[in-house]
Amino acid sequence: MLDVPLETTVDAFLGGRVEAIQPARGHHRSGLDAVFLAAAMGPSLRGRVIDMGAGAGVAGLSLAARADHARLVLAEREAELVACAEQALTRPANAGFADRVEVVGVDLLAGSARQAAALSPESFDHALMNPPFHDHGRVRASPDDFRARAHVLERGGLDDWFRAAAALVRQQGTLAAILPADRLPAVLAACDGRFGGLAVLPLHPRAGEAANRVLVRGTKGSRAAMRLLPGLVLHGSAGSAYLAGPAAILREGASIVDIHPVWSDPQWGETATNSS
C-alpha cells in the first residue's frame, strides 16, 4: 500500500455509508458530481465496473455501497490519490463492500499502460467517468500541477477519454459520464461511433436556471437515438438546501431513477420502481 499524503480529511458520503480519504489541499476534491455519477447506475447493476480517473474513489465507492452485485476497479494515475483510495478501503464504514473494490494505479489514456496494469480490452461491463473538462490551452491552468491535471485535458481532449472507455467496455456495455453542460457538444462528438442510445440529463441548480452539469450515459455499439430528458432541479428557489429527491441521492444512497423516473431504461436493467 502506498503512503497517503500528510494532510488528508475523512469525508462521509451517502449519509455515512461511505467514507473517503482525500488530500486536504493541492488536489481536486470530489463531491456532488461524483455522487450523482454513481447514482446514474441503479442498485440492481451487476458485473465489472471501472471508475476512470477515479481520484480518491468517491464515485466508485458510492456505487459499490449501493450496488451489491457490482465489482469496482478504481483506476487513477496520481500516486497520492491511489494511496488515498487504498487507505479508504480499510475504513470500517466501507467494510461491507471493500472486498468488491480494487484500486489500480494507471494512466488509462495509454494503451500500453492499460495492458501493463492487466486492464484487458473489453473486460468491463460498465464504466464511470468524470474526466478533466477544460481543453488544453483554452484556460489558465491552476499553478498547482495536481489540480491542473485534474481539470485540464491533454492535447487529445475528451476524445482520448471516450476512446479509452470504448476500448475497456465490452459490446453492449454501458458508460456514464458527468461534465459541465457546455461540454455536451464535445461529449456527443466523442461518443459518435462508440456509444449510442445516449440519454442526456441536465442538472439545474434551480428551476428556471440554465443547467450547469449534464449526465450522459450510453451503450457501446448501440444505434438507438439520443434522448434529451427533462432536467433534474437540485435546489429550491431560495437558500442552498437540496430538494427532497437530490437530497435522497446525496444522503440516503438513492439512485437517479428512484427520484426521476424518466431516467429509467430497460436496456440498463432499470425500471421506475427501483429502490435503494
Image (cartoon, helix red, strand yellow):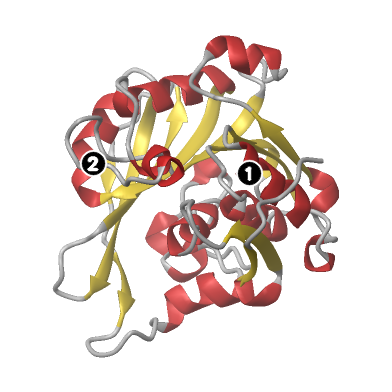
Q: Is residue 68 visible?
A: no
Is the N terminus in the top left, top right, bottom left or bottom right quadrant?
top right
Residue at 33 percent of width and 23 percent of height: 159
The residue carrying pointer 1 sits among few (fewer than 14), some (14 to 19) or many (20 or more) residues within 10 Å by Cα, namely many
Q: Is residue 17 above or below residue 58?
A: below
Residue 95: where, in percent of width, then height?
Answer: 85, 60
Disc ID at residue 184: 2
- At label 1, which amino acid type do we have? Glu
Residue at 41 percent of width and 26 percent of height: 162
Question: Tag 2's secondary structure?
Answer: helix
Answer with mark 1 or mark 2, whichever residue precedes in sequence: 1
Residue named by callout 1: 80
Residue, far top:
112
Residue 200: where, in percent of width, then height?
Answer: 31, 47
Left or right: residue 111 versus residue 65 is left
Left or right: residue 109 versus residue 92 is left
Disc ID at residue 273: none
Residue 109: where, in percent of width, then height?
Answer: 48, 21
- At label 2, which amino acid type do we have? Leu
Question: Tag 1's secondary structure?
Answer: helix
Residue 2: where, in percent of width, then height?
Answer: 76, 41
Closest to the observer: 256 or 127? 127
The residue carrying pointer 2 sits among few (fewer than 14), some (14 to 19) or many (20 or more) residues within 10 Å by Cα, namely some
Left or right: residue 46 versus residue 182 is right
Residue, far bottom:
238
Left or right: residue 225 versus residue 53 is left
